[in-house]
Image (tube, rainbow, N blue to C red):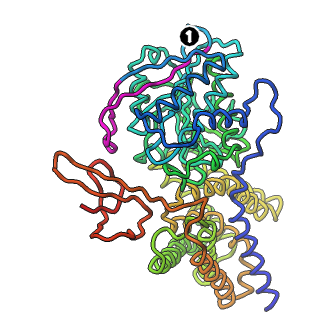
Amino acid sequence: MRRSILGLAVVLLVLLGAMAAKSVLIALPPVRAHNDPGQFDAERAAGRLAFLLGDERPHPADTPANDFVRGKLAMLLQSMGMQPVVRDQVACNELFKQRGVSCARVRNVIVVLGPPAGKAVLLNAHYDSTPVGPGAGDDGIGVATLLEVGSILQKRALKRPVILLFNEGEELGLVGARAFLADPLSRNVGSLVNLEARGVSGPANMFETSVPNGAAIALFSRTAAHPVANSLSTDVYRLMPNYTDVNSFADRHWLTLNIAPIGNETRYHSAGDNLAALDHRTLQHMGDQTLAAAARLANESPAVSSGNRIFMDVSGRTLITLPLIVGVVLLVALLIAFAIIGWRRGGMVRGVALAVGTMIGSAAVAWIALAAIGAIRHGMFWRAEPAWTHLATYAGVMLAGAILLLTIGSKAERTQLRTAFWFVVLLIGGAIGLLAPGGIIFFLFPPLIALAGIVATRWWQPAEQLAGWLAILFLYLTWGAMLALLEELLNGGPMWLFAPLGTLIILPVLIEAAPLIRSAGLRLAGLVSGILTIVLWGVAAAAPAYSADRQQRFVIEHATDLDRGKSWWSVVNDGAPIPAPGHWTRGKLPHSERLRWLLP
């Protein structure tokens, strides 16, 4: 009995350790200590950004503070041997969900490098900030990248012009980008690399492309040394009500790559978006990708492709791409294969019930725990230490999985459960594919590896189990890395969502370890996994809600609706009650869809 308990505890702890280590899959290499001539120098770029931001006061568009930043930007470009031009224009906001500012005066700073003729490559970033922060990440990282890339490209013989666009007014509703569309230079653009930020650390994600994406993905796969991108993210982003300058440029149908980091989103649009928080490794990663893509576009014709491709990186090491139609056909073929194998082996209903039940049960455990802690601690209590809440959620997956494995799945053989699990994975891939076809890519290769093992058992008996572990490893390197990015992106919740997402990695391990779990028995397996879950939720509940690095967002605004003759005080925070007198209510303002606290 002691051996069973010890073995079970080791399996669960190793599995938790693997889930905690997912962030290593997206970790960036250190900033290069020495750069060869023509390489992107992150430290030099950071130094220029520090010069531009000075005392790091906020510099919204069309304010004296931004005039000061623009003057320093033009002076810096001239000192680097470039000839900036400042366009003084008025442009209007065309976003239907963010109409706080209708029109504004903007002054875009433009530099043209290379020959005067040929389809131009546009590199774009905005130099204005929000009214509440210095904007070192959003979008100082993009400005710093453009300055360093420009300093390198101006020394090269280019076959096509490269336009550096430092636009003003993105935070007012993309008005700087709208202004550029009226600029004669925009008529000659053929491709775009847009630089943005929703955080200050982590990898620079390529999260949006032109549609169809074949040419853009061909370019990215050839140029990105450490690619972090997947077609699930690009498809989901198109379904979200988020905007960057790319939205303004979309009607021109330029070949497009949109790149941004998302690490530590708590500093986004806040006073914490400062130079001290900006990770120079992130700047290095963005700079390397931008320079490589721009250099290729400026000297070679991009691949001609009208098709759509699905793609994913493998832990930032390489990019796997497939034509979308190939992915769809392969998914259908795998579904049919596992359905046939499952029907022949039997136990399919029990195996499917195990997988679906674990997802639902673990999500319910997480939701109950979050609600219970939330009744005691208001707001997003996990913001400072989200890892503990993630681990507690994943421990709940192990609890639900172990109990269901020893009840619903008790009479099913491991081979039957294995087949049913991969069948469910393929069903999930198909369901996701209906909304976001790019998500199919994550659900093809692990089942394909497992199927190869099943076929190979005709000649070598251990092949199926070995292939099962290899499939899990591949799933961890791809879906695990995606999950680590989602943990950063969805730091504001819903946190229970990570239970079904984590089930895809955790449950196949529990199935492979079924003999050990069964030897422990239902009572002991439930006790060990239950204690682990309770302890981790206790740690998550006791951890500080906020820290100096991850603060509570708290923005105070005053808004007036002239048409209705009404005014409000507004507070945007994480939902915690307002520490001020008055009858505050939760609601929305006419110009925004964001929930906030309101007081007439």
**Residue 432 x, y percent position in the rendering:** 49, 53
**Residue 285 x, y percent position in the rendering:** 69, 39
The three-letter amino acid code for the residue at tag 1 is Gly
Quadrant where the C terminus sits is bottom left
Q: Is residue 91 magenta?
A: yes
In the visual, does 524 lie left or right of 238?
right
Residue 526, visible in the rendered structure: yes
* Camera-nearest residue between 221 and 405: 221
Name the residue: 62% across, 61% down. Answer: 422
In the visual, does 556 lie left or right of 312?
left
Numbered disc 1: secondary structure: loop
In the visual, does 247 lie left or right of 535?
left
Residue 411, visible in the rendered structure: no
Range covered by the magenta-colored residues? 90-113
Residue most extreme to the left:
564
* Camera-nearest residue between 84 and 98: 84
Numbered circles on residues, count: 1
Name the residue: 35% across, 60% down. Answer: 596
Name the residue: 59% across, 84% down. Answer: 407
**Residue 236 x, y percent position in the rendering:** 48, 48
In the visual, does 423 lie left or right of 457?
left
Q: Is residue 26 above or below residue 370?
A: above
Q: How would you rate the neighbour count of disc 1 (Cα within 10 Å): few for under 14, some for 14-19, many for 20 or more?
A: some
- Residue 75 figure quarter: top right
Name the residue: 80% across, 90% down. Answer: 2
**Residue 356 x, y percent position in the rendering:** 53, 70
Q: Is residue 403 magenta?
A: no
- Residue 111 figure quarter: top right
Quadrant where the N terminus sits is bottom right
The residue singled out by tag 1 in the image is 118
Q: Is residue 215 above or below residue 495?
A: above
- Residue 169 figure quarter: top left
